[in-house]
Amino acid sequence: MLEGTTAEIRERKALRVNPAKTCQPIGAMYASLGVNKCMPHSHGSQGCCAYHRSHLTRHHKEPVVATTSSFTEGASVFGGLANLKTALNNIFSIYDPEVVSVHTTCLSEVIGDDIPMIIKKSIEDGIIPEGKTVIHANTPSFVGSHVTGFANQCKAFVDYFAESTGETKNVVNIFPGWVEPADMRELKRLADGVGVEYIMAPDTSDVLDSPLDGEYHMYPDGGVTVAELKATGDSFLSVGLGPLASTSAVESLEKKCKVPSKVLELPIGVQATDAFIDALRLAGDTSVPSEIEKERGRLVDMMSDMSQYTHGKKVAIFGDPDHLVSMVSFLVELGMVPAIVVTGTPGKKWEKKMKEIIDPVNEDCVIKAFSDIHYLHQWIKANPVDLLMGNTYGKFVAKTEDVPFVRFGFPIMDRVGHRAFPTVGYQGGMRILEKITDAFFDKRDREDPDHEIELVL
Amino acid sequence: MDSATTPDAIHVLDDRTDQVWTKGSGKAFKCDTKSTAGSVTQRACAFCGSRVVLYPIADALHIVHGPIGCAVYNWDIRGALSSGSQLHRNSFSTDLAEKEVVFGGEQKLEKSLLELIEFYKPKAAFVYSTCIVGLIGDDVERICKSVSRKSGIDVIPVDSPGFKGTKKSGYQAACEAAFRLVGTGDTSDIKPYSINLLGEFNIAGEAWMIKEYFERIGIQVVATITGDGRVDDLRRCHGASLNLVQCSGSMTHLSKLLKQHYDIPSERVSFFGFEDTARAIYTAAEHFGDPELMERAQELVRTEIAKYAPQLKQYKKQLKGKKAALYVGGAFKAFSLVLALRALGMKTVLAGTQTGSAEDYEQLKEICDPGTVIVDDSNPLELAKFVLEKDVDLFIGGVKERPIAFKMGVAFCDHNHERKIPLAGFEGMLHFADEVARSACSPVWQFAPRRAQAKAFLDSASQSDFATESTTTEGGKA
Ligand code: SF4
Ligand code: SF4
């Protein structure tokens, strides 16, 4: 299907061809699903909401619920106040959530609906039952990307809920960034291993990877609770993973409740995981248990076993900024050579950071924010690579160019492993390495002539 | 508070009580309304409707004028196959940014169009406006005209911002847009026995199968609209003598336009199941009033059914007595499904659609068994409630319903446009039976708690005195 792509690169400012990002509300929706008994609410026309839910469902293979204000033409002229109030009324009476998490869409942003005002009015009018909360995040999609929406939503959790009682507790807040439910589970396991008490917000494990138990739960038994979100204000430290996804939340918490903050890269690969473990160890004033040290050792061992196959291999990769920083660092640790790195999300600072990481191994690496898959493809055509990494949309490029392809990032709509196996932590590193080398070996086994097939690799 | 779906924990939204109906209850039924604000509707928007209906026109450029998300979520999500150009499977968006939201996006749209047309050399271009475009005041019609002049190809605006309504209103806009091409092509080589297939999207190659039936009996298919579609086919589709219209809703409006302007009669048909497929072919043959043609049609139906019917037997044995729930996009599809399931020995206990009209539901009520629950524009809780209450074995629906069914330990069959296997035609019935059986009879359900409980009960029952033939045959199946 990409037969039209040429090797000659056309610089485009005006349009997107095969995007490498999507819109803010889906990030807000994903984050909100990581709150216990929370109903994400899309303030706009019903189409956006249906799209976001379907897209998340395709990725997670899980039911995703969210409500919508169902704008009509009238609402787009007179504003969505009435729609939102009716919606809130209906949501609380039928679906009975603890929290309704309202995010805007392009339409309500352009109309200029004042959500806090509508929430206030709804409280005054008695629409919101005692003890229940409605929160909001502004998520205009003509700014930033889906990751921005996730970040804005995380900040909203802090702004609406965090309280300081004045008594600091021996608890660390972990803002995990936009990672998979399996990753959040793994981060918690590591934190448990190091022996610190923590609150993870949001936490989509047990929500978007819930077991088959013969029933449909509108609110699966997972997610950070409102009580925990309130208590984040009493923690002695916040660790935000992934600068783009988590910085605004931890900074806001620092401002609001004086909880000191630390922002780290997502713990993917050896050094980034080291940094995470180290931060936890320092926070908990404990030592790293030998089990975790052994995990690290096993990852490094596997890296050494496979180094002859990874070393010097050229990689094209696209995805979200936070994911890319850590994944590319890991590729460098593996001796691989990032050749082109593309994200759809805008970010000059990110480009600079990527350059610092890649320069030591490849000064000519092309690094582009606010770009798309078509650009990446054109570049690969002119400069063949050994491996492509990215979300599901990369498969057409991989097929057209006959390059081994490792899926990573959001969304993955044609494989199942991402929901079950983490990519963060040392174990996650092993999984990534397995996938990369499998991709290389599978290609060889498939394509090598019979007499060259090797049994032992 | 228990969030699980024990039946008594479920209420139907007050506004919705008229949109749920049980056969035999005698009360009036309401549908074709906007979704209630605050409901977890399974519905999409008008833009989505127009986009999915037109996108299989493979040699046209389809560009979404709006912010990025609207373009991303419908990027190649349906398996509408093309035998040639694959241009339609790319995603083009103007990716409106803050600046354009303030100052307008006309310039960006014009530049994008010119650039893409020069690069991809499409036969025509469709421009879809999403919700905010009208609000920021872009005159898309004017830009399309200007680009059309400059580039020499038809550039057609599709006016269906999401807030206009459900997918259904998008279908109408899509038909209007497609109709702009009609009547501009050469029809001189079109034979007297000729048809258009409307509302056939060539999911998993279905259009190819159906087209072949007609060609075999000597009927020319001028255009499949829009599956494996080409701009030039649309241009000359007014030369056909008859329109066969599938899938209620999506192409009805185009058939009306073709009737109005070119006096082409149309027949509503379905190619799902033996019965409906045969009827569709006979309908066409009958239209031309040629006994020989009819004989060829009957011969074809006989051959095809003889080929596949024996193979269905094994599935019938496995599926007999199982209960199905269906929640699909259009009502016409629901009719066919009820019949096809019946042909497999299954019973439909719940039938619902996202976009059915009053007429549709009347017909649906007719063909369903007493006790069947009929719903319009449902939501997950409601669906879950009925599935458990009715002890359903198989759920037929779309992407959003699949995981819900699975969580409840209920088998699933995708019958929406994201399906991966051809379910149309005679051969399709076999695929359908196979898909249903593979899901409904999967060993995985023995581990699903609901089934596990039932099994434990039956096991203990078989040791006690009320073990009977029928419980063992039924229980042994799952
Ligand atoms: S209008 Fe905005 S929020 Fe809605 S789908 Fe499009 S980009 Fe996303
Ligand atoms: S409702 Fe409007 S803004 Fe939302 S997806 Fe549909 S067209 Fe886009």
Image (cartoon, rainbow, N blue to C red):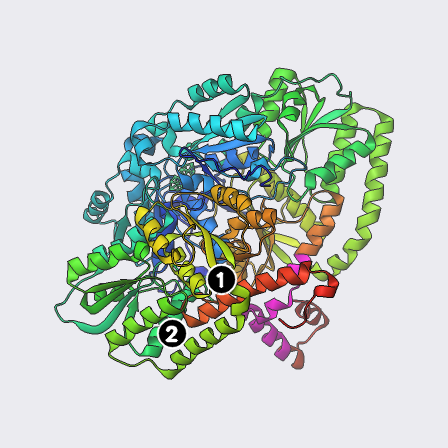
Image mark 2: chain? A
Residue displayed at 55% across by 47% down: A397
Is the stretch drawn in magenta largely helix, strand or loop? Answer: helix
Quadrant the N terminus of chain B occupies = bottom left
Judging depth in this view, the residue of A144 and A288 nearest the camera is A288
Q: Report the amino acid beneath label 1.
A: His
Image side of residue A221 versus residue A456, left or right: left
- Can see residue A94? no
Q: Residue B386, how many percent across, how many down? A: 51, 56
Judging depth in this view, the residue of B185 and A76 nearest the camera is B185
Cα separation, mark 1 vs mark 2, equals 17 Å
Image position of B350 with respect to A434: above or below: above
Is B154 inside the magenta-drawn segment? Answer: no
- Which segment did they paint magenta? B436-460
Residue displayed at 43% across by 39% down: B70
Residue matched to label 1: A418
Image mark 1: chain? A
Is B448 inside the magenta-drawn segment? Answer: yes
Image position of A149 with respect to B229: above or below: below
Q: Residue B269, how many percent across, how many down? A: 68, 34
Judging depth in this view, the residue of A407 and B13 nearest the camera is A407
Q: Is mark 1 within 8 Å of ligand 1?
A: no
Instruction: Determine which of the numbered discs, if any, sits on residue A189 in the image.
Output: 2
Image side of residue B108 versus residue A169, left or right: right
Q: Quadrant of residue A284?
A: bottom left
Element type at marker 1?
helix
